[in-house]
Image (cartoon, rainbow, N blue to C red):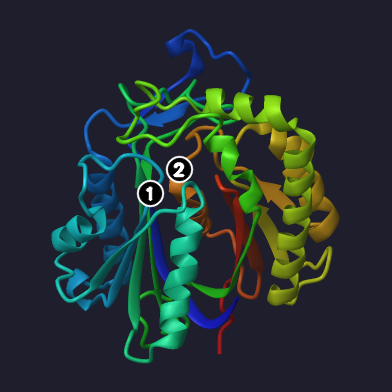
Amino acid sequence: MRTDTIYVNSAATWLPPRRQPPSEVGGTPEDTGYTMLAVSDGPSAPEMAVLAANAALARAGWRGAELDLLLHAWSYYQGHDFWSPAHYIADQLGAHDAMPVGIQQMCNGGAAALQSAAAHLLGDPTMTRVLVTTADRFCPPGFDRWNSDLGVAYGDGASAVLVSRTNPAEPAAPVPAGLRLVSVTSVSAPSLEAMHRGDDSFGAAARAAAESVDVRRTKRAYLRRNGSSGYRTAERERLETLLGLAMKEAGADVGSPRLRCVVLPRVHRSPLLSVFGPIVERLTGAEAIDFGRSTGHLGAGDLTAGIADLLDREMLAPGETALVMSTGAGFTWSCAALTAPEPA
C-alpha cells in the first residue's frame, strides 16, 4: 500500500532496564543467537505502552488530547481478562476524543497497526494524528520467554509511533527529524496457522490445553504431520514476494545507494542467516541490520521498535530509504519503507 503523504513524526521504544543472559537461566536447549533478553520486573504490557507513548508524544511536541485514533497491538496477555488495553492506554494519555482500537495479529501486530493507521489517514480527511502502540510482557507462570517457542526467545518492551499527514520537514512542524512513510506491504500464508494450533482441540478457556504457553509442542505436532518443507518453501516465496513489492513501491533498485538498509525482525539467528539475510542481499543489495540480539523478539513490536531505532540512531541521511521487516504467526510478513525527507 502506497502511503506517500503519511509521515512518522516520532517514535519511541520503552525497554525495561534489566537484561537476562542465557547463563542466568542455565542456558537454553538451542542457540538462538540472543546475548540477552529485556525483562520487566514491574510494569505490565499496557503500562509499558503508556511509557513509550509519552516519550513519543514529548518528542513530537504533541498532547494525547490531540490524537484522533489510537491503535494498540499485542501478541500475549495484557494483564486482565475480557478487557480493552487500547482504551486504558488512551485514558492514561488523556486521549479522550481518540478512537481506541485493539489490533491482534500476533507478532505482526505492530505492522498491521501501522498499515491500518495509514489507511485511516488516507481514507478519512477529518483524521490528522494517529498513535500506534505495541507492548508485550512474556512472564511466568504463563510464558517461559526462553523455552515456550521454537526458533525465538522473547523480550519485554513497548513501542510507540506517531503518524500524520504533516510533513515533519516543513518549518512549521514541531519536529524536523521524522520520516516519510512511503509504503507498508504485507503478504500472508493462512495455511500455516496450524503451526500454533497443533493437534489441540478448541478449548473453552485460556490455557485449557496446558498450564503455560507451549508453542514447541504445537509446532512439533504440525511438523510431524506436515514436515518442514512446506513452511520453508512458503516462507521463502512470501519473503521474495514481499521484498519485491516493497522495493517497487519504494521506487528502489537493487544496489541503489539511496536504499540505506533493511532492518530484520528480531527472531532466531538461524532463519536470519539462512533465509532472511540471503533474500535481502539478493533482492535489495542493502545492508541487513539486526537490532534484536540484546533485546529478544519484542512480540508485536519488532517493526515499530525498528522504526524507533532508525530515528534514535539518526541512520538515514536526507533522501535515504530504509526497509523495516516484521513476521508473525498465522503467518503474515510485512515491510515498511521509510525515507528521510529532503529539504524543500
Residue receiving disc 2: 299
Which image quadrant is residue 38 in?
top left
How far apart are the alpha carbons under marks 2 and 1? 7 Å
Q: Residue furthest top?
A: 26
Q: Under tag 2, what secondary structure? A: helix
Q: Quadrant of the N terminus?
A: bottom right
Q: Is residue 33 visible?
A: no
Identity, as a three-letter code, of the amino acid under mark 2: Gly
Label number found at residue 332? none
Identify whether 25 is placed above or below 12. Answer: above
Q: Are marks 2 and 1 in contact (CB under 8 Å)?
A: yes
Identify whether 89 is placed above or below 32. Answer: below
How far across and down, in percent of the image, does residue 268 sit?
62, 32
Name the residue located 62 percent from the left edge and 61 percent from the top edge: 335
**Dot 2 or dot 1, earlier in sequence:** 1
How far across and down, in percent of the image, does residue 65 sit?
17, 74
Residue receiving disc 1: 74
Identify whether 271 is placed above or below 101. Answer: above
Q: Quadrant of the C terminus?
A: bottom right
How far across and down, in percent of the image, does residue 169 sit?
47, 82
Front position in the image: 250 or 322:
250
